[in-house]
Image (cartoon, grey):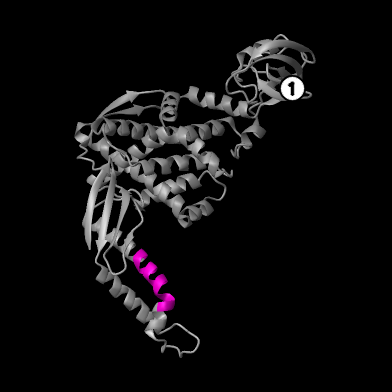
Amino acid sequence: MQVSVENTSGLERRLTVQVPGEEIQVKISAKLRELSKTVRVKGFRPGRVPMSVVRQRYGKQVRLDILNETMQQGLQQAIRDEDLRPASRPRLDAEPEDKEGGDFQFSALIEVYPEIGKLDAGTMTIERPQAEISDEDVEEMLKTLRSQRKTWATVERTAEAGDRVLIDYSAQTKEDRVPAEGEQRFAIVMGESGFEELEKAIASIPAGERKTIKLTFPENFREASLAGKKAKTDLHVASVSEGVLPEVDEEFIKSFGVEDGTLESFKEEIRNNLKRELKQATSTLLKLRLVEELKRISPDLEVPPSLVRQEAVSMVVQMARGQEIPPEQMQALIEPFMEHAEGRVRAGLLLGELAQQNNIRTNAAKVREAIEMVASTYEEPAEVVRLYYGNKNLLEQVESSVLEEQVVDWVLENATVKAQEMKFQDVITAATAKS
């Protein structure tokens, strides 16, 4: 077998494999002899079917099977012999040349992983966030929890900031009326809708009354036919409700699983939860900062397009979890994710290379600890642990995450590390904004 490798562009390689015709014929003959022992043909006893009959009946299919088998084996051997690191499955470049009695030749295109040079942690500088959970952080979270349990009470006045307003509307654009008949109803919270022009108009309309005004609807308005358009709009304020926060009493506290119902225990539970959140956010931010350092060291690193697309598809599927996405819509959904997906793939390649260059292996005990941490937030932790260890994909996700954390820990021991004093919320915001 002869193999040639051509660098077509970037990380794409063309493998051309040529197999002697005699070798193909030997394999076909061996397969036909094997078949002749088991095939049943009317008029002949089992194992006594003449080879000419077997060849006539099965020769074409056997040849096709042998050629397919030869291509698979040839590609695998070519990849091994040329020491390639495939990032995608090979795809045939053209129809194989199959001449009866002649040599068999085929070519395939394959993407390979990029060659990454030495990544020296000693040249890196990482800022490590230093933050503590303050009493103010605990009080702020307590306010958030109360807000999440807010109830609404109808009031007889014009709407103010924080009120929930139920609105009926119809709008007339240059093209048509929306809706075609009647009115549409929706609710907004004053100060949170992002539609300032509408909120300003609502603030001047008492509950139960209506007003006709001209509005310019935002580009992201829920009704696509009105998005970005100007329209004469009839508004009816159906009701105005103000939020009523629950008292932080024993019943409220126990609803969060704090059995003794005391404020002291509740705040301690909140503080512990915030500590876990801070630990995760700090880990995320450190990884992001490490990736930025790695990108600085390897600014021209190419990434395999097939991996980027695969990551983008995964992101779309995760976003639309539980929904059926028609194939014709998939492409349009994928494109907006491509840039983010490329960043993720580049980060994964660099972190993986750093782990490989420094013999960092996934620590099983840390994987177990990570799974148990997730499981502890559920009512049946043992069931969740079993679920993770029984699901290959879930387990691999945790293993990958743990390995990345180990890489970060290793870098922090070998790089220049500078402490950065930060507030809890600043760490959370920075980790969320960049991830």
Tell me the residue that label 1 is attached to.
153
Amino acid type at image mark 1: Ala
Q: Is residue 355 magenta?
A: no
**Quarter of the image containing the C terminus?**
top left
Q: Residue at x 30, y 33 (%)?
A: 290
Q: In x, y percent, where is residue 303?
A: 32, 39
Residue drawn where x is 60% and y is 37% of the image: 256
Which region shows up in magenta? 56-68
**Residue 384: x and y, percent?**
52, 51
Q: Nearer the viewer, residue 99 or 368?
A: 99
Q: Quadrant of the N terminus?
A: bottom left
Tell which of 215 and 368 is nearer to you: 215
- Where disc 1 sits, the SS reads strand
Q: Residues within 10 Å of mark 1 (few under 14, many from 20)?
A: few
Do we see residue 369 in this rendering?
Answer: no
The x and y percentages for residue 410 are 27, 40
Residue 289 vs 399, above or below: the answer is: above
Judged left or right of residue 297, residue 53 is right
